Image (spheres, coloured by chain):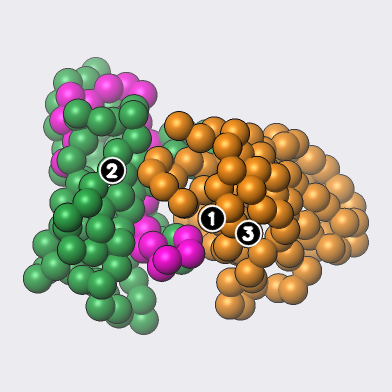
Chain colours: A orange, B green
Amino acid sequence: DIQMTQSPSSLSASVGDRVTITCRASLGISNYLAWYQQKPGKPPKLLIYAASILQSGVPSRFSGSGSGTDFTLTISSLQPEDVASYYCQKYNTAPWTFGQGTKVEI
Amino acid sequence: EVQLLESGGGLVQPGGSLRLSCVVSGFTFSTYVMTWVRQAPGKGLEWVSVISARDDSKYYADSVKGRFTISRDNSKNTVFLQMNSLRVEDTAVYYCARYNHYGLDVWGLGTTVTVSS
């Protein structure tokens, strides 16, 4: 099975900072990658799909890039409401594995 | 409004069984792939199982294969997760989610399963 490795596992940044989270697949998955945001006590929320397409209603400070094995989620200017955990997920074939998650703090 | 509502969680002893349900509303259920995702306390997300729209394909995580069974009733807008031979490590919040060809775009609030003696 393809493994998804996210880094870092946690980070602390200041309001207004540019934040980058990476996700690496152990084998190529084309662009079948989604990013989710999860706040404590809430279900995950889809942010980005097809590696780089912003889900409707998601602020434009979020962006995604990559294809094949290496992917990136970027928050261009970190806001207080972005404090959350972020997960990547592959969905080309089962199992639809998630990355281990990245906890973002301010 | 699109909604997913899970139920059926609870406290069960190791080796026991539970059946989770997820009732959906606000969209044409029979045309969507549905999935279950779980999250153990303080841990990350773990994909559990997926079922095709027409109930002709099902897949499972290795951690639950042979113990869990996913099913659906399109006449009742409901997807199920039958969980047998439960283990302590199955303790988690279980979410159902809709797959919209590009990711899991709608999630329920989750139901909590606790496996403990």
In the rendered structure, which amino acid carries the disc numbered 2?
Tyr
Residue B32 found in image quarter: bottom left
Considering only vertical position in the picture, is A97 above or below B57? above
Q: Looking at the picture, tell me which residue is in the foreground, B115 or A70.
A: A70
> Which numbered tag is attached to residue A32?
1
Residue A23 found in image quarter: top right
Q: Which subunit holds the residue at mark 1?
A: A
Which residue is labeled 2 in the image?
B59
| Kind of element beneath mark 3 | loop
Q: Which subunit holds the residue at mark 3?
A: A
- A91 relative position to A21: left or right: left
Marks 2 and 3, Cα distance to the nearest angstrom? 23 Å
CB atoms of marks 1 and 3 within 8 Å: yes
Location of residue A26 in the rendering, given as x and y in whole percent from the top left corner:
59, 34
Location of residue B36 in the rendering, given as x and y in whole percent from the top left corner:
33, 49
- A12 relative position to B13: left or right: right
Q: Is residue B88 magenta?
A: yes
| Kind of element beneath mark 2 | strand
